Image (cartoon, rainbow, N blue to C red):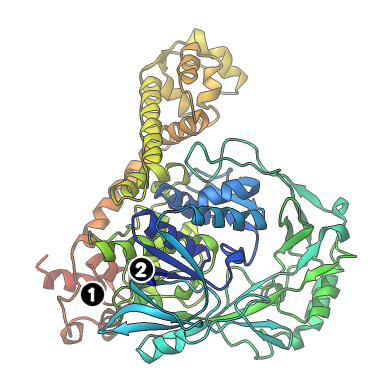
Amino acid sequence: MDFTYDVIVIGAGHAGNEAASAAANMGSRTLLITMDMNKIGQMSCNPAVGGIAKGQIVREIDALGGQMGIVTDRSAIQFRMLNRSKGPAMWSPRSQSDRHEFIQQWIKTLLHTDNLFIWQDTVKELVIENGAVTGLKSALGIHFHAKTVVLTAGTFLSGLLHIGKSQIVGGRISEPASFGITEQLKSLGFTTDRMKTGTPCRIDARSIDFSKMTEQKGETDFHKFSFLEESQRELKQMSCWITNTNETTHDELRNGLVDSPLYNGQIQSIGPRYCPSIETKIITFADKISHQLFLEPEGVDSQEYYLNGFSSSLPLQVQIAAIHTIQGLENAQLFRPGYAIEYDFFDPTQLKHTLETKRIKNLFFAGQVNGTTGYEEAGGQGLIAGINAHINCHGGDEFTLARNEAYIGVLIDDLVTKGVDEPYRMFTSRAEYRLLLRQDDADMRLTEKGNTIGLVKANRMEQLLSKREEQTRLRNFVETQSVKPAQINDFLVSKDSSELKHGCKLSDLVLRPQLSIFELAEAVPELQQKLDEIKSRKEEIVEATEVLLKYEGYIERERLIAEKLQRLDHIKLTGKIDYNSVHSISTEARQKLTKIAPETIGQASRIPGISPSDVNILLVMMGR
């Protein structure tokens, strides 16, 4: 057996799987090392993918040739498009997955990927020579050689679980933690700290009274995650259920706070502000008499339900007593309690935009080791790290995404430029150019980029070109086809839309908020004929065309602003200025510029504490 590889990926979670499959599909001899081959792609927390802004990231991963969207579609048991009441920049896909099937789909995907090998083991030490990683040593005593290494260890680095006063060493419940790598990297000068996340209990469906809850069904229209036509939802679709905490619940929780690891000093690390535990909620929002909870199914053949909104590290008996006060859960039987977990992460400002570390060449970090949380954020990082690990092995220009090109670009730029002071989660509000980063056009934005670097295969590129051609043809027709008042007015009245006094183009009617292309086709036979000519992905093509027509002015204005600001990202800074010698900028600016070493003026301008006047001085020094 040959223990020499181009790329070695440590950890088979959401970041590791994307990194390994990307590197292998681009042609690198790749090894994926995992503690347990039966837990590849494990959904450690809730059995769902996507959500606000997160769904856009998964669409981008798919558009670039990644796997998360395909795996999610094939394991989906409920799909919903969130934020439909808002504009298309806010639409976000979300899917419940069958937890077991999600793992099986990932295993099947990886085992059928050329150039990709899997090894079950634990990594104890990286091999560093002359400032570059050259391999690693495992718990089984094997010395693996590699040109590049991608670290995606998730919560396993020095992981410690908390349930009340009980502390259990582990990366997930019933799974061992990993030791050695953090200590080694600290000795090499890396900055590290601890973060905390948590998960709720799992409940036996046979003990739940669903009749006391509100059913939340999924959607059955054309939307899904992957842009590939052949990627479809295949499993039985299931409902989620909504219930609420109450004042009695909160009383039970308050009585147990004395034994809460979060409030008795047992947990010292940084927790997520946006996804707080239930004990944090009752303190932070003390005036609220209830909090909404969602019961989410874990799978088609499972009796396990995830209690979303009730993350907790309180003692087991406190969790049970509080849950039994909730409507529908009065007799709930638990499969296991909720718990908190503390783990090591590395300050992401120690990374380049490629996710290669600045200190050690050919070593990449991706996922929760960078201070993020969420499967989607991890997958996006893993994809970029895997792509650039391959490029480091075989040559080529480094691959990065700008803030106006992808949410993945926003994510990585935020990490390497600003760092983190809590587990980082993507929100639409983090992106300046939301209208340019819609979920519906991720393929239009990114698939050609994926094709250029060799990750996107021929069939995906063919489907993109076909979609673009059909979309252009439909748009041209709508913008040139005229309609007369006599032909359309009765229809307009039926839709509570004002009548025409003169003829107009179909596109003028599409701009009306209460009208859609499909509805107009009912009254305009020529439009219906044009739609009938679209043989595949009709709904997707029509929706994308409609969005472009209705929001064209806003989209164009945002594009012009983005292009103007992006010019600063073309002015390279790396290695050109000794910031400590520039006394015309503030002391804070000198310190932060020296620490982060921004690659461009644009990145420098986004560092917290760097003022516009500091940026102007840098521009003058660069002769601009």
Residue at the (71%, 43%) spot, across then down: 236
Asked if residue 282 shows in the view, the reply is yes
Q: Which mark is residue 614?
A: 1
Residue at the (61%, 42%) spot, across then down: 233
- Most distant residue in the front direction: 1
Residue at the (18%, 67%) spot, across then down: 572
Disc 2 to disc 1, C-alpha distance: 45 Å
In the depicted view, which residue is nearer to us: 176 or 90?
Answer: 176
Q: Quadrant of residue 273?
A: bottom right
Q: Quadrant of residue 364?
A: bottom left
Residue at the (53%, 27%) spot, across then down: 515
Q: Quadrant of the C terminus?
A: bottom left
Asked if residue 503 shows in the view, the reply is no
In the depicted view, which residue is nearer to us: 619 or 124?
Answer: 124
Element at label 2: strand
Q: Which mark is residue 5?
A: 2
Q: Which amino acid type is shown beneath numbered disc 1?
A: Asp
Q: Quadrant of the N terminus?
A: bottom left
Q: Quadrant of residue 608?
A: bottom left
Element at label 1: helix
Q: Earlier in the sequence, mark 2 or mark 1?
A: 2
